[in-house]
Amino acid sequence: MNRADASGFGSLVNAAVAHAVTALGNGHGFQMSDMICASEDKGKPHCFYQPASNCGSNILISDGIPTDGWGIDNEWVQLSTNTRILERACFRAAEVLGGATASLSLCAFGTTLEKWRIVAKLILRVQPDIEARIYRENLSLLAWSRGTYAAVHIRRTDKYVEAPPQATCAYADRLASMCQGRCGGLDVFVATDDIREVREFAACHSSIQHSWKTHSLEGSPPRNFGRAAHYRLYAELMLMVRSEWVVATFSSNVGRLVQLMRDQSVDTMASLDDQWVAGPYG
């Protein structure tokens, strides 16, 4: 079995952005693989994200694993040290996106994370019809999400094999330290693969003390990679990306992807596993 077959959406997309940095930074084209698509859509080109850059001497199609001959390093901390490739990739992405002065300035003078975010803006543009469907089916009725809210990502199940799990109330305590004077009555979205965590988070001292209103998407997350699971996960990503503050773990690919997709300042997102904070995402 191809190793990408056993990888989750977050790991595949993070690897693809790393591939895109290397491809664009070396003057090549880039195309996202169908590996990131729902099971019903695999085999179709551009089946979730819009086309990126097909201009270049070669076209790299990212499949979520290292590709021989491209010099690609999937480790995001190590890749970020190649500042020249990252800067070239940033400028190329910014130009494809329209060459806005602010984006070009970030490519020249911004932080490593800001440059990664410019590349991600090009690579991670969802197809308009799919984005509309995700909004209609998962987000349109969430009135609280149109105001100021916070989010936490509490990953359980397979998380245990990658990093020690963090206590549920540690997420609440860290969030309280971030929102400070704006904590009272805050809406808090809980993204999790274990729906029991929502009730546990609501029972934490910080949640009760600040009268937080806890939210989640309805029902237990599907355990397959069909459209329902795929679109639900992306809806959760969007809620975290748009929130005022996020508490997550950067040992999780989803946590790192959220930081990559956000426009807010780096200090509006916190990781509970400190050993992962060094590098472009933290």
Image (tube, rainbow, N blue to C red):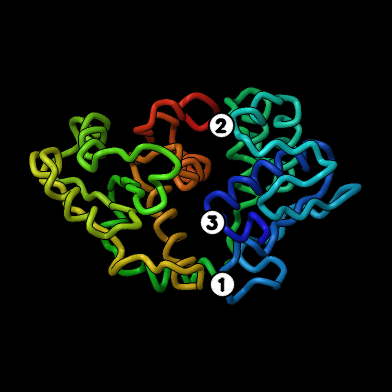
Distance CA(mark 2)–CA(mark 1): 29 Å
Q: Which quarter of the figure is the N terminus placed in?
A: bottom right
Residue 82: quarter of image: top right
Circle 1 crowding by C-alpha within 10 Å: few under 14, some 14–19, many from 20: few
Q: Distance between the residues labelled 1 and 3?
A: 20 Å
Residue under the image location 30 percent in, 38 percent down: 166
Q: Name the residue under label 2.
A: 113
Local secondary structure at mark 1: helix
Q: How crowded is mark 2: few (under 14 residues within 10 Å), some or many (20 or more)?
A: some
Query: What x and y, as percent, mark residue 181?
Result: 18, 31
Q: Residue furthest left?
A: 209
User: Taking 106 as reference, is 36 above or below it?
Assistant: below
Please name the residue shown 57% across and 58% down the image: 6
The answer to whether marks 1 and 3 mark residues whose Cβ atoms lie closer than 8 Å is no
**Up-down relation of residue 221 to residue 100 (above or below):** below
Pinpoint residue 80: horizontal percent, then vertical percent.
64, 28
Separation of disc 3 and disc 2 at Cα? 21 Å
Lower position in the chain sequence, tag 1 or tag 3: 3
- Can you see residue 105? no
What residue is drawn where x is 70% and y is 72%?
A: 43
Residue 199 percent coordinates (x, y): 17, 55
- Residue type at mark 3: give it: Phe
Question: In the image, which disc is placed on residue 63?
Answer: none
Question: 7 or 50, which is in the foreground?
Answer: 7
Q: Can residue 128 be seen in this view?
A: yes
Q: Nearer the N terminus, badge 2 or badge 1? A: 2
* Lateral position of residue 47 relative to residue 265, left or right: right
Name the disc covering residue 129, or none: 1
Instruction: Name the residue type under label 1.
Output: Asp
Q: Residue 9 carries which label?
A: 3
Kindly report which numbered mark, 2 or 1, lies closer to the viewer in this rendering.
2
